[in-house]
Image (tube, rainbow, N blue to C red):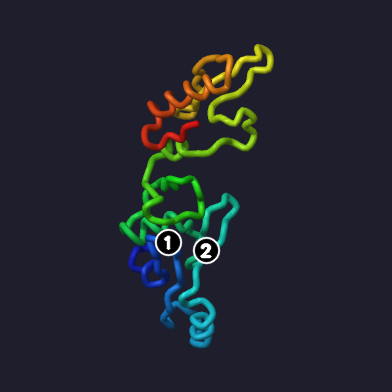
Amino acid sequence: MLTQEVLKELLHYNPDTGIFTWRYRDRKWFKSDCSCGSWNTKYSRKTTGSIDGKGYLHVGISKRYYRLHRLAFLYMEGSIPRYVDHIDRIRTNNVFNNLRPCNCKGNSGNSGIHAHNTSGYRGVSLNSKSGLWVAQIKIDGKQTYLGRFTTAVEASLVYNKAAKEHFNEFATLN
């Protein structure tokens, strides 16, 4: 398991920019003596991180991939919370002040509008049969009905109120 000590030996993290860079590596990190110099010439002091399939920056260390927002917590605080939330919802922004530990509920409360959303508001959809706008919110994995409204704006305001009550500071409002 990756420790804070090993992480700090391999990478440098700048909490103000959110950027990780490779440190100069000692020979002990290489299988043969000849690869140490070429690796350090090519990568030492260079920015690291590539975007994974979900849009987060990640890096490979000892045959395992780690997301950089999680490594920021390990680097700064010595442990990794179960969930880490990007306050601004930008998955590549790993500035430490933009990251906060949370639970599953908080993390889902700070998610963006789903790709299939056509209303432009979180938790709001048009009921094609009645022509009314429906507000609903997912709480603990269950969809909760909030009511039907004549405008999408009315429905979004009701959703906002429920989101504030349920998600607190993690709520993403319309």
Image position of 150 with respect to 143: above or below: above
> Residue 54 at what x, y percent from top left?
57, 50
Q: Which of marks 2 and 1 is in front?
A: 1
The amino acid sitting under disc 1 is Thr
The answer to whether marks 2 and 1 mark residues whose Cβ atoms lie closer than 8 Å is no
Q: In which quarter of the image is the N terminus?
A: bottom left
Q: Residue at x 41, y 56 (%)?
A: 95
Please give the label number shown on residue 17: 1
Please give the label number shown on residue 49: 2
The amino acid sitting under disc 2 is Gly
The 10 Å Cα crowd at callout 1, few under 14, some 14 to 19, many 20 or more, is few
Q: Is residue 46 left or right of residue 78?
A: right
Q: What element carries label 2?
A: loop
> Residue 22 at what x, y percent from top left?
46, 72
Q: Is residue 157 left or right of residue 73?
A: right
Q: Residue at x 51, y 24 (%)?
A: 156
